[in-house]
Amino acid sequence: MRVEQLWRFPVKSMRGEQLRSATVTKDGIAGDRLIHVRNHHGVVTARTRSGLLGLAATTDEDGEVLVDGLPWKDPAVSAAIERVTGPGVEAVQYAGRERFDVMPLLVATDGGITAFANSGRRLRPNIVVGGVDGLAERDWPGRTLRIGEVVIGMLKLRQRCVVTTFDPDTGEQDLDVLRRINREFDGRVALDCWVERPGTISVGDPVEVVDEHLEPPPRGGWIVGAPYTVP
């Protein structure tokens, strides 16, 4: 097995950027989901404002987050966000662990994506492991993923949501995608993971699954599916 793809999502719910290598920290891929959109109710995501998926977030050489090629604080970016989410929103930077929906790292496999029979981008993984037979990933929760010096704990299969129903290129919605996930995969595809030992990984690096039990982070480190506010 090997690292087939690496992805970072600098702005929560926007398109991500594909990487050749990545620094993996205790909070997942460095630079992942550092910016999010909020209104007076809390965080705004593609679950209710799917137009966010049409905006592309990248990171420049200096580490600045860009949206459609412009600095994320640019007034033109603010206007673009309002067009797809409505008035009264703002983009903010926040590095707390609550910025992740469940855990700080999502791992998918080529075998799982093939069985999914759709674009793997709908799943928004950080790491795609290649060379995996079929649905072998479904037996991985509770085991450990090793990529060189990096050690990753695999907690559980990810419960999927309505975001999977939106085409990552056209934005068109197909509710049958989620119906099929619920029907054929018990609603769960890819793996919620945490980082036990940080390091650097690159596309092509060998991947090993080992039967080593790791204690997941204590409750409260990541707030599962909960809205959050930013100080």
Image (cartoon, grey):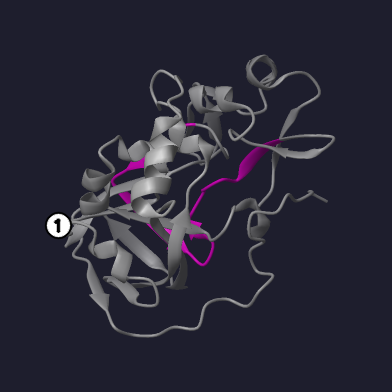
Is residue 101 visible in the rendered structure shown here? yes
Q: Position of residue 187 (x, y in %)?
A: 44, 51
- Quadrant of the image for the N terminus? bottom left
Note whether 178 is above or below 170 in the view shown.
Answer: below
Q: Residue at x 67, y 61 (%)?
A: 223
Figure quadrant of residue 93: top right
Q: Residues within 10 Å of mark 1 (few under 14, many from 20)?
A: some
Magenta highlight on residue 145: no
Figure quadrant of residue 118: top left
In front of the other: 188 or 191:
188
Magenta highlight on residue 28: yes
Is residue 71 visible in the rendered structure shown here? no
The residue beneath circle 1 is 131
Q: Residue at x 40, y 77 (%)?
A: 142
Note whether 115 is above or below 206 in the view shown.
Answer: above
Q: Which residues are magenta?
A: 15-37
In front of the other: 213 or 23:
213
Q: Residue at x 52, y 23 (%)?
A: 55
Figure quadrant of residue 92: top right
Q: Position of residue 152 (x, y in %)?
A: 39, 71
Note whether 171 is above or below 90 in the view shown.
Answer: above
Q: Residue at x 37, y 41 (%)?
A: 180
In front of the other: 158 or 64:
158
Lateral position of residue 215 relative to residue 35, left or right:
left
Q: Mark 1: which amino acid?
A: Gly
Label 1, secondary structure: give it.
loop
